Amino acid sequence: MVRLGAVNFALGGSELNMRHPSIIDRMKKTPSAPSLAAVTGTPKPSIKGKKVNKAWLHDHINDPYVKLAAREGYRARAAYKLKEIDEVFGLVKPGQLVVDLGCTPGAWSQYLRRRMSPQGAAAGDLNGTIIGLDLLAMEPIEGVHFIQGDFREADVLAQLERSLAGRKADLVVSDMAPNLSGISSADAARIEHLVELAIEFAQNHMKAEGALVAKVFHGGSYNDVVQHFKAAFHTIKPYKPKASRDRSSETFLVGLGLK
Ligand SMILES: C[S@@+](CC[C@H](N)C(=O)[O-])C[C@H]1O[C@@H](n2cnc3c(N)ncnc32)[C@H](O)[C@@H]1O
């Protein structure tokens, strides 16, 4: 049984600034949840730390997407996850308003920016609006409006709403992933909470025919998250891009058309 104080701490905020305190109630039911290894794809701790780091470094250096990202000027290999999702579902179009939640270091925003530029350029004219938000600072990307703050907090949401200035988004993408505490039930709840907030944001600030792409993890809260998606969207497509590592339980849900 996880103590509620510990859960609230693990959720990363006081109940006062939590936009979804109801999550605490759900935590009382102690959902079955994935281990840290299952959520992150991190090798089991029985392997010595140095060996893990060496193996990770070896894989990283030899990873074709890392090489491609370096060649094409993307800040992270993550760009190819969104690129593949976009190529499969045809989501990004010039002229759109796109909100990128959990955008740092900026690879998804870079991809969006190029897709919405007349010549696919990384700089210069941008046909559309990209608003990125993250807890962490982000090196500026020309034309991308960045907000630094915690998406769970009401004043950060208010900032984001101000930048929308009454407009509705065509597309909301969320690659947000919480820092994991290692307490599996609390981690599952934190993941679910971020996805719930992204869905709620889409319901309030996205066009009815819009789409939400959200990173989710197989394991503890996956089925609940799918249910939240089903309640909000007409069509739900789970998709794991090739650029998402096999050993990671990460996958993506694409919700199309708000109910
Ligand atoms: C996997 S990274 C995103 C990578 C990004 N899509 C890219 O292409 O560069 C996940 C991001 O989610 C952010 N994040 C996690 N929880 C958040 C929260 N509550 N509010 C805002 N950002 C959050 C983290 O700071 C981190 O930068």
Image: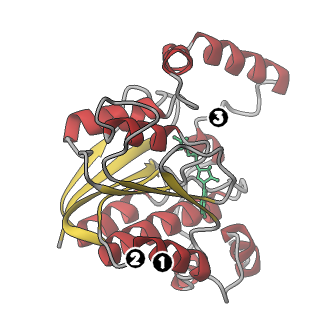
Q: Secondary structure at mark 2?
A: loop
Q: Are circles 1 and 3 on residues that touch, CB within 8 Å?
A: no
Q: Quadrant of the N terminus?
A: bottom right
The residue sitting at 77% across, 23% down in the picture is 53
Whether residue 201 sits left or right of residue 17 in the image: it is left
Cβ at disc 1 under 8 Å from ligand 1: no
Q: Amino acid at mark 2?
A: Ala
When the figure is inspected, residue 38 is found, relative to residue 176, above or below; the finding is above
The residue sitting at 37% across, 59% down in the picture is 223
Image coordinates of residue 250 in percent, x first then y, are 47, 42
Residue in the foreground of this view, choosing between 22 and 63: 63
Q: Amino acid at mark 3?
A: Thr
Residue wearing tag 3: 42
Q: Which badge, 2 or 3, is on the more N-terminal residue?
A: 3
Label 2 or label 3, whichever lies nearer to me, is 2
Q: Quadrant of residue 235?
A: bottom left
Q: Secondary structure at mark 3?
A: loop
Whether residue 31 sits left or right of residue 84 in the image: it is right
The residue sitting at 45% across, 76% down in the picture is 161
Q: Are circles 2 and 1 on residues that touch, CB within 8 Å?
A: yes
Q: What's the CA distance linking mark 1 and mark 3? A: 38 Å
- Tell me the crowding category of disc 2: few under 14, some 14 to 19, or many 20 or more residues within 10 angstroms, Cα based: few
Q: Which badge, 1 or 3, is on the more N-terminal residue?
A: 3
Residue in the foreground of this view, choosing between 118 and 202: 118
Q: Quadrant of residue 196?
A: bottom left
Residue wearing tag 2: 165
Image coordinates of residue 57 in percent, x first then y, are 71, 18
Q: Is residue 249 visible?
A: no
The residue sitting at 69% across, 53% down in the picture is 137
**Number of the label disc, if any, that sits on residue 162:** 1
